[in-house]
Image (cartoon, grey):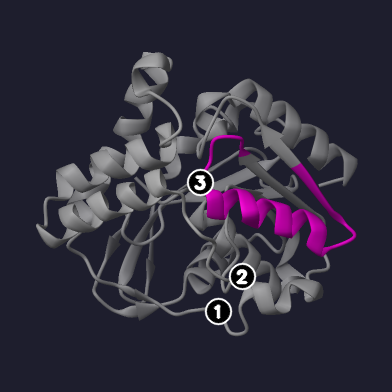
Amino acid sequence: MPHLSVPGAELYYEAEGPASAPAVLLIHAGIASLRMWDPLVPALVDDHYVVRFDTRGFGQTRTDDVKFSDRTDALDLLDHLGVEKACVVGASRGGRIALDLALEAPERITGVVTVGSTPSGLPDVELTDAEDAAFDALDDAYEEQDWARLVELETLLWAVAPTRDAAELDPAFVETAHALNRPNAAHRAEAPVAAPAEPTAYEAINDLQVPLLATAGEFDLSPELAAQAFLVSALPRSEGYIFSDTAHLPSVEHPDEFNAVLRAWLTKHHL
């Protein structure tokens, strides 16, 4: 299994497709690993070089408890694979990393797609009572260091969402969502420290010069929906899309629709 040695970590990654084709870098959500992109990759590899990796604290990546930069990790991986430029597709925190990366290294990024992502530095958005209660339960599990319970509650909060009933959803999707996050319990005691972007994406958003597609699921949490609306309105070259009947993982819950939307946008912008 391929790992890239970087300061303080061994990054697990996968790269598929023609190396000479336009590159797409996929960065996973905080309730998953690079495995969340499995339904997407077959639709891209014929004409794209698809690169994905497990960020520190997730999946098969190993890390020491050191200070690091998610942006530097991503660039180190692109350098290792000989990728000069890439379009970055990021889900949740992966989208936040994508925005920070595009602002920090604009010469390396050709476009950004966010999926239920809040840009770094976005002011706090008020939670609903149900969302607030769900986060309180997460805090309790963290304090008790009950990592299995923590990842279970995370999945229910984000992938199912407080406004939906898991029993009414496709059981295969619910199980897949839990399976994507469950292995991350082994990393919860790790403590690498991610260096924040300076300036934040919220402060520097007007400097983003590449095409941006900001998406979210209609049942995502209040801050993520507010962030999607902000990103769509922030720039003249930004576009938005709301996936119906899904929450924080539209690419997992409705992969065919997600693939169609992404492919159309990539084609439109020659990416």
What percent of the width, then of the height, locates residue 203?
Answer: 68, 79
Packing grade of label 2 (10 A; few <14, some 14-19, many >=20) is many
- In the image, residue 59 sits, relative to residue 175, either above or below, namely below
Q: Which residue is found at the position 36% from the left and 23% from the top? A: 166
Residue sitting at the far front: 129
Q: Nearer the viewer, residue 254 or 25?
A: 254
What label sits on residue 197 in the rendered view? Answer: 1
Query: Which portion, as a residue range, is magenta?
Result: 217-240
Instruction: Of the two numbered discs 2 and 1 on the same chain, state the one appearing first in sequence.
Output: 2
Question: Residue 248 magenta-drawn?
Answer: no
Q: Amino acid at mark 3?
A: Leu
Please tell me in which quadrant of the rendered image residue 140 appears: bottom left
* Residue drawn 37% across the image and 31% down it: 177
Q: Residue shown at 66%/73% (left/top)?
A: 202
Looking at the picture, which amino acid does disc 1 mark? Ala
Residue drawn where x is 22% and y is 56% of the image: 187
Residue underneath mark 2: 100
Q: Residues within 10 Å of mark 3 (few under 14, many from 20)?
A: many
Instruction: Name the one closer to the observer, 207 or 48.
Output: 207
Q: Earlier in the sequence, mark 3 or mark 2?
A: 2
Q: Nearer the viewer, mark 3 or mark 2?
A: 3
**Which residue, as the protein is rendered here, is positioned at the far bottom?**
198
Does the magenta run of residues contain 226? yes
Q: CA distance from mark 1 to mark 3?
A: 23 Å
Q: Where is residue 120 drawn, in percent x and y?
A: 56, 70
Quarter holding the N terminus is top left
**Circle 3 residue:** 221
For the residues labelled 3 and 2, the Cα–Cα distance comes to 21 Å
Which amino acid type is shown beneath numbered disc 2?
Answer: Asp
Judged from the image, the secondary structure of the residue bearing numbered disc 3 is loop
